[in-house]
Image: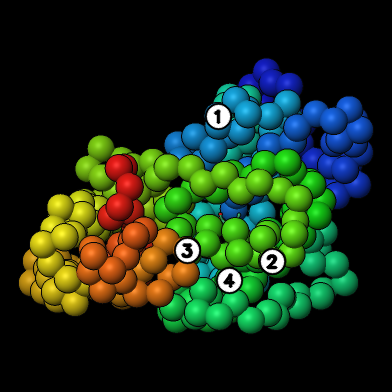
Amino acid sequence: MPALIQTAMKIYATIKETEDALSPYRNGKRSIGFVPTMGALHRGHLSLVTRSKSENDVTVCSIFVNPTQFNSPSDLEKYPRTIDDDMQMLASAGCDILFAPSVDEMYRKGDYSTINEDFGILDKVMEGKSRPGHFAGMLTIVNKLFCIIKPDNAYFGKKDFQQLVLIRHFVHTHHLPVIIKACPIVREDDGLAMSSRNRLLSAEERSNASIIPQTLFKIKSMWGEKTSAELKEFVKDRFNMVSPLKLDYFEIVNAETLEPVKDKASGKSAVACIAAFSGDVRLIDNISLTEQV
Ligand code: PAF
């Protein structure tokens, strides 16, 4: 185990140790806040820890790079792993318990089966189209983690907007006793949404990537004057003409149903969502067109 800064943070790799550490809180009716992560932490993750600390008696984080939510072995392989830095950051942010299990601990006896449910269009559009099976894998691990930690509150970033919609749907339909807290996207100075994948970008790719948030801010300013169809054309042209990034999709959808929203008049809660490749790194981002951000 690498040297840690002076900290009270407890680190466990097994389910049993984690459950034992949490049972006094549960029995004492003290609230448990949970921040699930795949590591490679940044300020976005730390903002979730800070929020959890302000709302709960104990804050638990998990670091687990979940193999079943990756679409290819090479994507899983190249996912950044920075466990030593992550532990330092979590300890400094005041995380109380870190659960960092092995793959065998989470997928016992090599059983990698994932949730097989009908989520309607929720897991089929946007990320679902580009990354088949991703959401089944993501929900499988989130469900396992909820079973182990049994949090009162769980914190997720709005950057993974479709993930958040599916988790909310899953918690609602399965009557899981956890409150899902959606937290604001944390952005770099040039607007790029913080993401573990940003560290895979070269300096040039990183600088070009700011077209993603700039486009979203521009779309927000045009919402109301233009229809979704017109805005889609605008985004396509912008990427084709001025950017080395390759657009994967741009959609304007209802914040809960993910149905397409045609224009401002027809949709109460519209979110503009984008995915684009910078080199071979896939970046996603979104902006609410109806809420102040
Ligand atoms: O958002 C993530 O980091 C992951 O999808 C999550 C929720 C930790 C599940 O592996």
Residue 274, numbered circle: none
Q: For this view, does 54 lie left or right of residue 150?
A: left
The residue identified by callout 3 is 256
Question: With respect to residue 261, does 65 lie above or below?
Answer: above
Q: Residue at x 88, y 43 (%)?
A: 19
User: What amino acid type should be assigned to the residue bearing mark 2?
Assistant: Thr
Circle nearer the N terminus (2, 3): 2
Packing grade of label 2 (10 A; few <14, some 14-19, many >=20) is few
Residue 18 shown left or right of residue 271 in the figure: right
Q: Nearer the viewer, mark 2 or mark 4?
A: 2
Q: Please state the quadrant of the image where ligand 1 appears.
A: bottom right
Mark 3: C-beta under 8 Å from nearest atom of ligand 1: no
- Specify the amino acid type for callout 3: Glu
Q: CA distance from mark 2 to mark 4?
A: 16 Å
Q: Label 3 neighbourhood size at 10 Å, few (<14), some (14-19), many (20+)?
A: some
Residue 129 vs residue 148: left or right? left
Q: Which residue is mark 1?
A: 50
* Cα–Cα gap, marks 3 and 4: 16 Å
- Quadrant in the picture for residue 201: bottom left
Q: Check disc 4 and report the residue beneath it.
A: 135
In the picture provided, is 75 more to the left or to the right than 102? left
Dot 3 and dot 4 residues touching (CB under 8 Å): no
The label nearer to you, 3 versus 4, is 3
Asked if the residue under mark 4 is in contact with the one under mark 1, i.e. CB atoms within 8 Å, the reply is no
Q: CA distance from mark 2 to mark 3?
A: 14 Å
- Give how far across and how far down residue 185 sits, in percent: 40, 45
Disc 3 is placed on an element classified as loop
Q: Nearer the viewer, residue 9 or 260?
A: 260
* Residue 239 coordinates in the image, percent (x, y): 16, 70
Q: Quadrant of the N terminus?
A: top right
